Image (cartoon, rainbow, N blue to C red):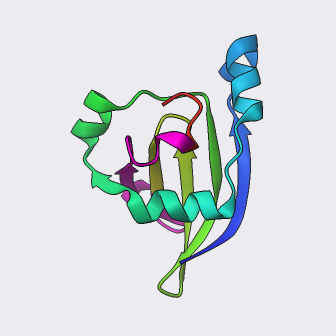
Amino acid sequence: MRVISLELHLERDALESKDVAVLCQRWKLTEADVLYFFVNATPITGEEWHALYDVMDCDYRGQIELGGETYDFSINGVSFGVISTTTQPVAAEMYGCMSQCAHLFPFG
């Protein structure tokens, strides 16, 4: 597993709230943090995502290499992530990592 690219992304709504914008802009994830997240995260269903996870208006996005294949990923500021193929983003896999990864998230 290898991180190819990593970039913080803020949605427009995050910029409208000064407090949220400051927390988002201070949030730092390294390549090692991304690997830690996906190694420790577990797959979650859409139902679990809706019931257990909030969504913040900032996330890290990039590409990751798994088993010789390149995938897109995002990690939201409240402890869930998504991995999808570059050709079929609809077939995304969701992952959650609440307690073990709490130190990585400003909103967790």
Counting from the top left corner in percent of width and height, residue 52 is at 30, 31
Q: Position of residue 99 (x, y in %)?
A: 37, 41
Residue 32 in view, yes or no: yes
Total count of labels: 0
Image location of residue 107, percent across then percent down: 54, 27
Q: Quadrant of residue 65?
A: bottom right
| Residue drawn at (67%, 50%) of the image | 29
Residue at 37% x, 52% y is: 95
Query: Between 29 and 94, which is closer to the camera in this rendering?
Result: 29
Query: Would residue 57 appear left or right of 97 to someone viewing this image?
Result: right
- Which of the 4 image quadrants contains residue 28? top right
Based on the picture, tell me whether residue 100 belongs to the magenta stretch: yes
Tell whether 90 sits left or right of 10: left
Looking at the image, residue 90 sits to the left or right of residue 34; the answer is left
The residue at the point 74 percent across, 22 percent down is 21
Span of residues in magenta: 83-103
